[in-house]
Image (cartoon, rainbow, N blue to C red):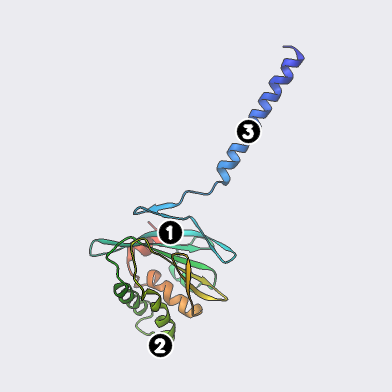
Amino acid sequence: MNKAFSTVLSSTVLASTVLSSILLSAVLIAPAAALTVDGVDVPDTYSADETELTLNGAGVRSKWFMDLYVGGLYTPHKGSDAQAIIDADEPQALTLHIISGLITSDKMTSATLEGFELATGGDLSAIQAEVDAFLKVFAEEIKEGDVFDLVYLPAEGVQVLKNGAARASIGDLTFKKALFGIWLSEQPAQQDLKEKMLGQR
């Protein structure tokens, strides 16, 4: 093998090795695909102010054999301790993707109020004003395809968005605990949805 050919061959092998390394690195750093739940692509991350949250888990809220919405829970780090997540004074988010045309403003308001009552043992006295303000977000028509984001930021309370538009900024940690308790408390809206949000199934 002459020296010139050897040099060309070595360069080709080196280039191939470098390219393989680049492609492998690209695969390793590429974001994971969104989780698909009942036809809804649930992103694997969520930006809450300057904090990037990770999808802890997601599932479907059903009632009377009808799928109503896909709920996703985002936290700074994955966890399966429901009470610890409820109590945590750190950025967190819940997303609700409406997948049924049967959900109405009145039904969503009624179900959410019931959830607050169950999560607080029926005592809303400390957060009644915040609950009332929160329920007003559901006053306008709710349609299939709507997305509600409930984002807790320690210094700002719960930021409520509908289809990406800010609708309200409500309460503090006490209200956040009751709100997240709707899905994660000992009496959640739906047990298997709670388990899926906690990554337990």
- The residue under label 2 is 125
Disc 2 is placed on an element classified as loop
Total residue callouts: 3
Q: Residue at x 37, y 64 (%)?
A: 194
- The residue under label 3 is 19
Q: Residues within 10 Å of mark 3 (few under 14, many from 20)?
A: few
Query: Where does the C terminus fall, quadrant-wise?
Result: bottom left
Under mark 3, the amino acid is Leu
Task: Indicate which disc, 3 or 1, sits on the residue closer to the N terminus.
Answer: 3
Relative image position of residue 73 (x, y in whole percent): 44, 63
Q: Residue furthest bottom?
A: 125
Spatial separation of the CA atoms under disc 1 and disc 2: 31 Å
Q: Residues within 10 Å of mark 1 (few under 14, many from 20)?
A: many
Rendering quarter of residue 71:
bottom left
Rendering quarter of residue 51:
bottom right
Point out the frontmost of discs 3 and 2: 3
Disc 1 is placed on an element classified as strand
Disc 3 is placed on an element classified as helix
Relative image position of residue 152 (x, y in whole percent): 51, 71
Query: Where does the N terminus fall, quadrant-wise?
Result: top right
- The residue under label 1 is 57
